[in-house]
Amino acid sequence: MNKAMQEVLFDFIAKYVSLTADEKNAIVSLDIFHSFKKGVVLLKEGQKSKNSYFVLKGCIRAYYVLDGEEKTTAFYTEMEALTPPCVISKTPSEYYLNCIEDSIILISNSDMEAEMNSKFPKFDLMCKMLAEELLAKQRIDFDEFKTSSPEQRYLNLLQKRPDLIQRVPQHQLASYLGIKPQSLSRLRARILEKSKQ
């Protein structure tokens, strides 16, 4: 694992807890850094998994397949973590996760986390803080999504995650917003027109 990516991770952790050299070495020795090529599927519908993911570089997409059509529900980019619901419920996954860019991802599983948390109580604390943050963010995102129109959702994305609009293929973005790709093209044109006025 290259040093630069280790530093990116340690800088992120430093926002929550301070690590000793021993703790940093313990993380590096875990062999949790993995590189994936664009297009790799990390989790399939019907698969059981214990894995949690943390994106150091790249982008993961979560999607369902309904009646042969992909419905995108989320994108995870740098410094975002996800634990698929199937890990917590110990049931087969209902959705897919795939890399839509070449990605470097930390993969940990529940056994490994339990071992680390017992050795280093700090990790347990950090995981709890991260989990609370994630839950709060998901709740806000979901509430916004429920009450907003596709145009408002798109404007929200422009404001909060402008990089996604450049990085994600148009049809996946449209699916995430709950509209057809041609509606997204029209919506973009409308917003552009407004911004010129």
Image (cartoon, rainbow, N blue to C red):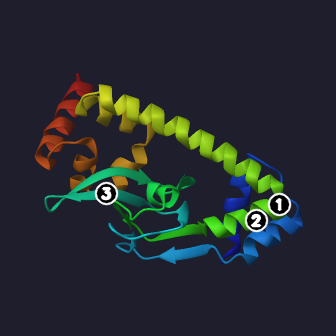
Residue 135 spot, x, y in % from top left: 54, 40
| Residue underneath mark 2 | 116
Q: In which quadrant is the N terminus drawn?
A: bottom right
Q: Is residue 30 above or below residue 67?
A: below
Name the element at disc 1.
loop
**Contact between labelled residues 1 and 3, with CB atoms less than 8 Å apart:** no
Q: CA distance from mark 3 to mark 1?
A: 35 Å
Image position of 19 (left or right of 167): right
- Please name the residue shown 80% across and 66% down the image: 24
**Contact between labelled residues 2 and 1, with CB atoms less than 8 Å apart:** yes
Q: Is residue 17 above or below residue 34?
A: above
Q: CA distance from mark 3 to mark 2?
A: 31 Å
Crowding near the residue tagged with mark 3, few <14, some 14–19, many ≥20 C-alpha atoms within 10 Å = many
Image position of 41 (left or right of 114): left
Residue 121 spot, x, y in % from top left: 82, 55
Q: State which tag comes first along the sequence, 3 or 2.
A: 3
| Residue underneath mark 1 | 120
Q: CA distance from mark 1 to mark 2?
A: 6 Å
Asked whether 108 or 180 is in front, the reply is 108
Label ID, residue 63:
3
Crowding near the residue tagged with mark 2, few <14, some 14–19, many ≥20 C-alpha atoms within 10 Å = some
Residue 48 spot, x, y in % from top left: 43, 69
Name the element at disc 2.
helix
- Please name the residue shown 32% across and 66% down the image: 45
